[in-house]
Amino acid sequence: MIKHQLFRGLLSCFIVISMSQLYAQNQGRISGGFQSTANLFLRDSLIGADNIAQYDNEFLGAESWLDLQYSVSGFTAGVRFDLFNNSNLRNPNSSYTDQGLGRYFISKEVGNLEVTAGHIYDQIGSGIIYRAYEARPQLIDNALLGVRGVYKLSDNWKLKAFTGRQKILFETYSPTVRGFSLEGFAQLGKEKKVSVAPGFGFLNRTLSDEVVNKMVGILTSYDDEDRFDLAYNVYMGSFYNTLNIGPFVWYTEAAYKGGDSYFDPNAIKDASKASSSIGKYVKDDGTVFYNSISYAGNGLGITLEGKRTQNFNIRVDPTLRTNQGLIHFIPPMNRQNSYRLTTRYQPATQDLSELAFQADVQYRIKKNLSASVNVSNITDLDNNLLYRELYTEVVYKYERKWQMTGGVQVQRYNQEIYEVKPEVPIVETFVPYMDFLYKISRKKSIRTELQYMSTGEDSKGVKHDYGDWLFAQVELALAPHWSFTVSDMYNAVPGKNSPTDANGESLALHYPRVDVFYVNKSNRYSLSYIKQVEGIVCTGGICRLEPAFSGVRLTVSSTF
Amino acid sequence: MNKLHVLISALVLISLVSCEEKSITIPDFEVPVSDKVVLIEELTGVSCPNCPAGSSELQNIITDFEGLVVGVGIHGDFLTEPVEGHSIYDFRTNVASELESHFAPFLGKPAAVINRVQFPTEDFLGIDNIDLWQQYVLAEFNKSSQITFEYNIDYDPATRTVTLGLDIFPVVDLPGQYALSLMVTEGHIIDAQKNVSEIIDDYEHEHVLRDMMTATLGDPIGSNLEQGKAVSKTYTYTIPESDNLWVPENMDIVGFVTDITGGEEEVLQAFEAHIIE
């Protein structure tokens, strides 16, 4: 730990000194960004916003990130300061406070070689075997603290290699990761209308003695029939290619993971003992096959995607759970929606057993009229339905005066799997929605959203989950600085999981929200009063259940 | 791309995949020889779908380490609300709520607090990976026993009063401050429990924390305890009247001494005694 802090300090000093010396010789470019959120927690036990320290005794919390990057003479160096103060980002049910350098790196181009040391964000292919990225809404930041070299073999081919340890907040996990990829690009034929962009990636993770000892301890506690041979290393590889033929694009990726230990929540443990349970570590190979074919031309855009995933859970440390320690990223296979009610139920990518298909068709009927349809279907490999969605959208623009967007969404959502809620039915929803934008003048506009979610009923006539919702929002924009929104999400017909009163009667509650936004150049400020129902928050298929929120939120973001 | 580049790439690839790893031997499980009794406080709840796996693991550890591990199920606030339309009882109590708040934060349930020790490789006191519980219990047996107990329990069925006479013997000199906690637990309670994809109506709840005979974080028993010199305590407790619950035959007293020097509260030794033998 001390060595790690010393290294961080020395590298930071080096970056600052290098920057100042280089600045004296050759003025470079400095860039960065600042993002901050401050929350005032106001307890509301009725909606479930209570029983954590923030509501009981802390009341105020904040998260901040300040990024600075400086580029000069082929050098790029950067640092990021992270702060978490009574934050519920790490764990929605508890409080987290810490601060320090969240990222530091320096890179240099030397001829055909670019070298980077420090915290590195990167991926191989679409990320199926390796992706180091940051998703602040869920506090995912799995940068690699290590070194990377990218060597240009030619104008169109490059070889990349890296090694290091995965970051966790202000420390690193003890296992190590290393990998390389070879990627290229070639145009074929005389007219060069066909191009390929093939790639091959390889990754190796080596467990530390500390993690091996933990795993040995776990396997020692298992019955003989539950035990397996443990290994320090796992190897995985992927092949990927993008083929362009005129208006068609075909992306394909196939990934294979050698035998690795992972936690299977459905496997039965201690079957021979008096007290057996569900969930244990197993060891198996894993595969992912992903294909995406798209066509674009004459106002028509079509994308067809398919994905098959089996036993592809890869972590730096197999004993980690939830979103911790994930090395890879498997692309989601459903539409990334944006309206409040159409995003209420979102499927998290299943990395042990998933078969998913998606079709997306967009067509511009006239210059001012377009329509789109999206269909997705996700099952496990035993053909049990996990998620199904039909989403339609029509956009009509009338001159430059107003624009209307409308459509419907139909969903089937396996709440039992995605939210681990026993004996709940597959949630059925039907959501008609409308978005109307009216430009009062060149600088003033008003936008309204109206959505209704109708949910299915169980055999007793009780509405699924929270039941039916009505959402309405009005937004007044006064360009270029101000905008104001008022919205309410109303539990119009409460369901099985809606809050109840002292007599057990379901309550039809309102979840209002008021926002004020102010934008000045590249600075953006917002002040919001929020009552928010429990729900799923996802970033690219990586999801987590967020508890209800009640309070005031101030955000500041800035880029420079 | 020239031939040298292709050759280098091929060599790197071949060298990485051609290594053969020496296998790791998994030793057989052995019960340690120890005078120490380890306490597991399981943070659990009837509305927690993953908690039956934790209770099962706790039961297996208690069975495997016969007489060396004591378990308590703490039904605090999180995921403890009775299962609507299924539950008969409500296991939530003020002391359970206070203990759960005291042990927070924890990532999720089930989580086990083992001897109230913050293990260096864990982020939280409550360990939510049930597969790790046994090895942390084993780690506690590497510490020597510092206290022994002698106790006597009298139960008066007419008044439902339990009287516990307890002698605490330091095995070594114990400089510092210490506290005694006495928990009242109940087992064999048949009631609903969520379990992954189902609700089990006739689930058998064991080691449920029902009340405490001491303060929630224990009663001080003094400081600078001398080797072999007993600290004697007597406690009485009246078991409430209730249909089907508070059955003395199914109830135990779980006692333990914590080292409260410096604000930490590691459990030095624990015992479990049936109210009616």
Image (spheres, rainbow, N blue to C red):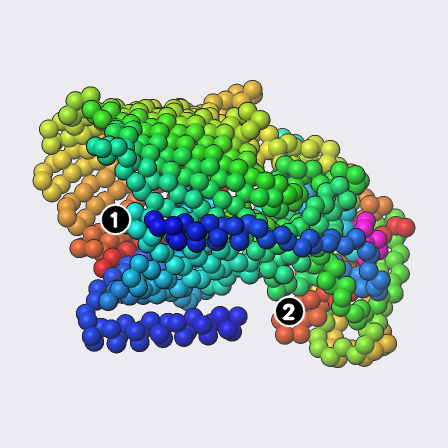
Q: Which residues are magenta?
A: B62-68
Question: What residue is pinned by disc 1?
Answer: A516
- The residue located at (28%, 30%) in the rendering is A245
Compared across the picture, whether A66 is left or right of B168 comes to left
Amino acid type, label 1: Val
Q: Position of residue A16 (x, y in %)?
A: 31, 73
Nearest the viewer among A217 and A47 is A217
| Rendered view: A140 above or below B53 | below
Helix, strand or loop at label 2? It is loop
Amino acid type, label 2: Glu
Q: Which mark is residue A153?
A: none
Q: Position of residue A122 (x, y in %)?
A: 39, 52
**Chain identity of mark 2:** B
Question: What residue is pinned by disc 2?
Answer: B264
- The residue located at (20%, 55%) in the rendering is A522
**Chain identity of mark 1:** A
Q: Please name which of the two marks, 2 or 1, marks the residue nearer to the observer.
A: 2
Q: CA distance from mark 2 to mark 1?
A: 46 Å
Label 2–label 1 contact, CB within 8 A: no
Helix, strand or loop at label 1? It is strand
- The residue located at (52%, 20%) in the rendering is A461
Asked which quadrant contains residue A144, the reply is: bottom left
Q: Position of residue B115 (x, y in %)?
A: 71, 61
Q: Position of residue B33 (x, y in %)?
A: 85, 62
